[in-house]
Amino acid sequence: MTSTGGNETVVSTAKTQADGTRPLQEGETLLEVENLGKHFPVTAGLLRRQVAAVKAVDGVSFSVRKGETLGLVGESGCGKSTTGRMIMRLLDPSFGKIVFEGHDITKMSQGRLRPLRRDIQMIFQDPYSSLNPRKTVGAIVGAPFRLQNIEAKQGVKKAVQEILELVGLSPEHYNRYPHEFSGGQRQRIGIARTLALKPKLIVADEPVSALDVSVQAQVVNLLEDLQDELDLTYVVIAHDLSVVRHISDRVAVMYLGKIVEVADRADLYERPMHPYTNALLSAVPIPDPAERGARKRIRLQGDVPSPLDPPPACRFHTRCWKAQDICKQVEPPLVELSPGHQAACHFPENTTVSATDAVAKAAVAQAPAPADDPAEPTE
Ligand SMILES: Nc1ncnc2c1ncn2[C@@H]1O[C@H](COP(=O)(O)OP(=O)(O)OP(=O)(O)O)[C@@H](O)[C@H]1O
Ligand code: SF4
Ligand SMILES: [Mg+2]
């Protein structure tokens, strides 16, 4: 990882980190999220009594390995940003667990979170509203140094100018204001701000969806280049599978507060198992005209149900063309149906195994083996 102190590279060859722990190696689990949920209370009356809850995120589990990019995809309102904000600890989870670098950070106090704020950073969707128009680029990108009381070896200004160059801007932009830049350049300023403290994990919430299509690819390429150069791990949030296709190693698909499918990128795009993933994929434009006829567009009926009162059992059953009685009665668990490929569906596609079969098989595998030759009871 390039330090703010010049072109020297800080790689994880050190035996221990400042907190005494061993640095993670590529591929080891950096972030583990277990049954994480956020229910926003809905209150009414003078006493503001809780009358309902918006089940924005309702028990999601996934992990992110060091050096990888996990894409988190789903329609508007399915809980992607809420999940991202909980990982950042900008929102307190209602239940569940977040483990970062082996430390349970779910209930960590703000004081203890302070160093963590350097390690986990967020890129926001809207490069217009996320930058203070009254501050110069130098002040915006340099703010994390000041907030964390960190002195860069060669001074904050020089460090900021180096970061500006790293994201494809010029050191001369230091004294300019956000309104002087295009949308793509503003997003570069936003990215520069997240890099200031050399984070380990970046949660990028719809990093390109507010940008012109012509500059989206440039920003995605920049994120990829920075990942290689700075040894970064990403969670990239998007509502569109085409955005995360290029950048993700693995993809998790969310529907109404739940994860319904997780798989390696190629596996997910070639063999989607959950009907919802299939529907999302069918809406992704195919560049090659020769292949366009091969895929049938699946048009989902109706709107996403309200997270105030999600449908019981499989939440997708009100819009699923394959739904049967069991889908309305029994919630399909998210289980591994092929190596590294999890889906939550009673009638998954591109496989002969259903979630229920997989659970039954796992239960049999876990059951204690009967003794070969039970001893005769003695008198
Ligand atoms: N502070 C809040 N209070 C109450 N409900 C909220 C709050 N924040 C989010 N929600 C609700 O939680 C649900 C999930 O919101 P979230 O912003 O996480 O969705 P999203 O997947 O990021 O959507 P989008 O693609 O539109 O950004 C939505 O129904 C939203 O209205
Ligand atoms: S469990 Fe049933 S309703 Fe849900 S996605 Fe699968 S087939 Fe459709
Ligand atoms: Mg969002």
Image (tube, grey):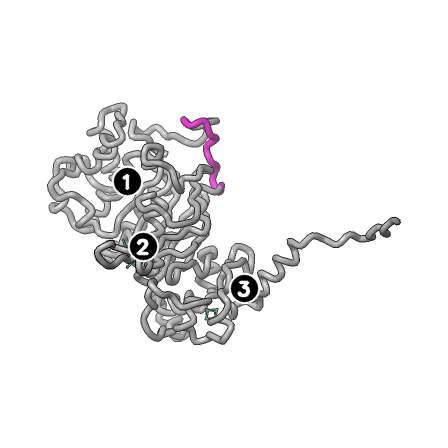
Farthest front residue in view: 47
Write down the region rendered in magenta: 18-28
- Looking at the picture, tell me which residue is in the foreground, 152 or 353: 353
The residue identified by callout 2 is 40
Alpha-carbon span between mark 2 and mark 3: 30 Å
Label 3 vs label 1, nearer the camera: 3
What is the three-letter code of the residue carrying label 2? Answer: Phe
Q: Residues within 10 Å of mark 1 (few under 14, many from 20)?
A: many
Q: Are marks 3 and 1 in contact (CB under 8 Å)?
A: no
Disc 1 to disc 2, C-alpha distance:
28 Å
Label 1, on which residue? 194
Whole-percent x, y for residue 32 in the image:
45, 45
Quadrant position of residue 48: bottom left
In the image shown, does 295 or 120 lie closer to the viewer? 120
- Circle 2: is it few (<14), some (14-19), or many (20+) Cα within 10 Å? some
Between 288 and 334, which is closer to the camera in this rendering? Answer: 334
x and y percent of residue 287 in the render?
34, 66
Near mark 3 (Cα within 10 A), the count class, few <14, some 14-19 or many ≥20, is many
The disc at residue 267 is none
Residue type at numbered disc 3: Ala
- Say which residue label 3 marks: 355
Kindly report which numbered mark, 2 or 3, lies closer to the viewer in this rendering: 2
Residue kind at label 1, given as amino acid type: Thr
Whether disc 2's CB lies below 8 Å from ligand 1 is answered yes
Q: Secondary structure at mark 2?
A: strand
Residue 118 makes an appearance in the image: no
In this rendering, the label closer to the viewer, 1 or 2: 2
Tell me the quarter of the picture where residue 55 sits. Answer: bottom left
Q: Judge whether 105 appears above or below 239 on screen.
A: above
Q: Which residue occupies the foreground of this view, 378 or 235?
A: 378
- Is residue 69 in view from this perspective? yes
- Earlier along the polypeptide chain: callout 1 or callout 2? 2
